[in-house]
Image (cartoon, helix red, strand yellow):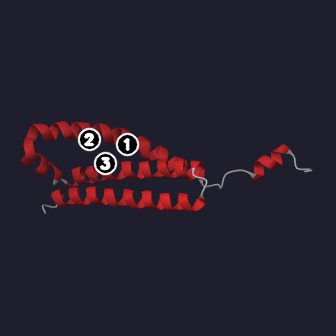
Amino acid sequence: MSFQTPLGVARGNGTARSGTGHGLVQHAIALALIPIGLAAAVLFFWMIQVGYAGAVSLLRQPWVLLFVVLLVALPFWHGYLGIKVIIEDYVSNKRLAYTAITLIRFLSVAVALLGIIAAAKIGFGG
């Protein structure tokens, strides 16, 4: 028999106090991706009209290159954070959850780095 009140039981089963910052980062990235996505659509159609040489010269502009790096990196970060939350919530085996989160992190960073390297190679004329 327990003499603990329902509020005391609820307080004992609360969060680990890390979800708020994680959620705020995920929401901030989602909000940042709205104008970046719209600008990417405009940039994409503009690049179609100017052709390959014009697109390469456009990507050699520092602000456009920074924009493309953000366009590549932020969706992978946002996806990683979302998948991490799903794994933490629904995978009960801690070892499997840790392995899956580590694998997702590695894959997200690897693919994002490939995109950033490709954009940098074009942007720096390599």
Does residue 20 appear left or right of residue 39 in this picture? right
The earlier-in-sequence mark between 1 and 3 is 1
Q: Nearer the viewer, residue 8 or 24?
A: 8
Labelled disc at residue 40: 2
Q: Amino acid at mark 3?
A: Leu
Instruction: Return the residue at label 3.
Output: 71
Q: Quick one: SS at disc 3?
A: helix
Residue at 47% across / 62% down in the picture?
A: 102
Query: Number of labelled discs?
Result: 3
Residue 38 is situated, as x and y percent measured from the top left of the image, at 30, 36
Classed neighbour count for the residue bearing mark 2: other residues with Cα under 10 Å, few (<14), some (14–19), many (≥20): some
Residue 87 is situated, as x and y percent measured from the top left of the image, at 53, 51
How far apart marks 1 and 3 lie (CA) works out to 8 Å
Does residue 101 appear left or right of residue 3 in this picture? left
Residue at 16% across / 54% down in the picture?
A: 60
Q: Amino acid at mark 2?
A: Ala
Residue 122 is situated, as x and y percent measured from the top left of the image, at 16, 57
Q: Amino acid at mark 1?
A: Leu
Residue 112 is situated, as x and y percent measured from the top left of the image, at 32, 56
Does residue 48 appear left or right of residue 117 in this picture? left
Q: Quick one: SS at disc 2?
A: helix
Residues under numbered marks 3 and 2 in contact, where contact means CB atoms less than 8 Å apart: yes
Classed neighbour count for the residue bearing mark 3: other residues with Cα under 10 Å, few (<14), some (14–19), many (≥20): many
Residue at 9% across / 40% down in the picture?
A: 50
Q: Quick one: SS at disc 1?
A: helix
How far apart marks 3 and 2 lie (CA) works out to 8 Å
How far apart marks 1 and 2 lie (CA) works out to 10 Å
The image quadrant of residue 94 is bottom right
Classed neighbour count for the residue bearing mark 1: other residues with Cα under 10 Å, few (<14), some (14–19), many (≥20): some
Instruction: Return the residue at label 1.
Output: 33
